[in-house]
Image: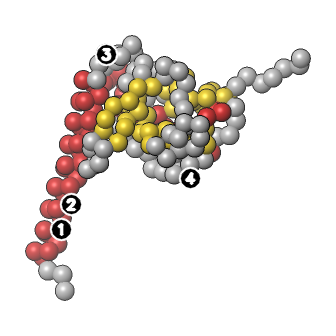
Amino acid sequence: MVDRRRIVTAAAGGAAALAAFLGLRASQSDAATERGTFEVQKSEAEWKQMLTPAQFDVLRNHGTERPGSSPLDREKRKGTFACAGCDLPLFGSETKFDSGTGWPSFFQPLPNAVGTTKDSTLFMTRTEVHCRRCGGHLGHVFEDGPKPTGLRYCMNGVAMKFQPAPAAGPA
């Protein structure tokens, strides 16, 4: 039988874990600001005004969208995936692949499109990927991707927008 003490202890432990997680996300956001100066600079209020709440959470607060929730994971057309914060082209459709993770995945970014930093949150070390122009958090890169790079850039679809390639006209 579950008694009141166990329920209170479990609730307190859950609250402490949530507070620690939120604190980690806040310190991660502070670290993004300390990475350096980016070409596109906006105040928090300006970012909130121009981005949806989901975009703001991911790009500015290092959030993560729910796997399988982004239509960009299923996007198959030719085109370019650009930063939702500053429109910088990030990935070409020819580098996209189905990783089975539920997030849009690419094996290589466009030249001079992204930057990376060490991410030691959530009790593990990963490589965070951000837009090199506005510093927006995009996702993480892992060393389990396909050839030719062996990398998997696992991106949050909400952090990007798709720009279809122009339709080919008559020759």
Query: Total label count?
Result: 4
Q: Which residue was labeled with disc 4? A: 100
Circles 2 and 3 in contact, beta carbons < 8 Å:
no
Q: Is residue 55 visible?
A: no
Question: Mark 3 to mark 4: distance in Å?
Answer: 35 Å
Mark identifier at residue 14: 2
Mark identifier at residue 62: none
Q: Nearer the viewer, residue 138 or 142?
A: 142
Question: Mark 3 to mark 1: distance in Å?
Answer: 43 Å
Instruction: Decide: few, some or many residues near mark 2? Use Cα within 10 Å; few <14, some 14-19, many ≥20.
Output: few
What residue is rendered at 70% in x and 31% in y?
78
Mark 2 or mark 4, earlier in chain: 2
Q: Which residue was labeled with disc 3? A: 37
Q: What element carries label 3?
A: loop
Locate residue 42: give its quadrant.
top left
Identify the amino acid type marked 2.
Answer: Gly
Mark 3 or mark 4, earlier in chain: 3
Q: Which of 96 and 72 is in front in this view?
A: 96
Circles 1 and 4 in contact, beta carbons < 8 Å:
no
Instruction: Work out whether 27 lies above or below 98.
Output: above
Expressed as whole percent of the image width and height from the top left, the position of residue 54 reads 42, 39
Mark 1 or mark 4, earlier in chain: 1
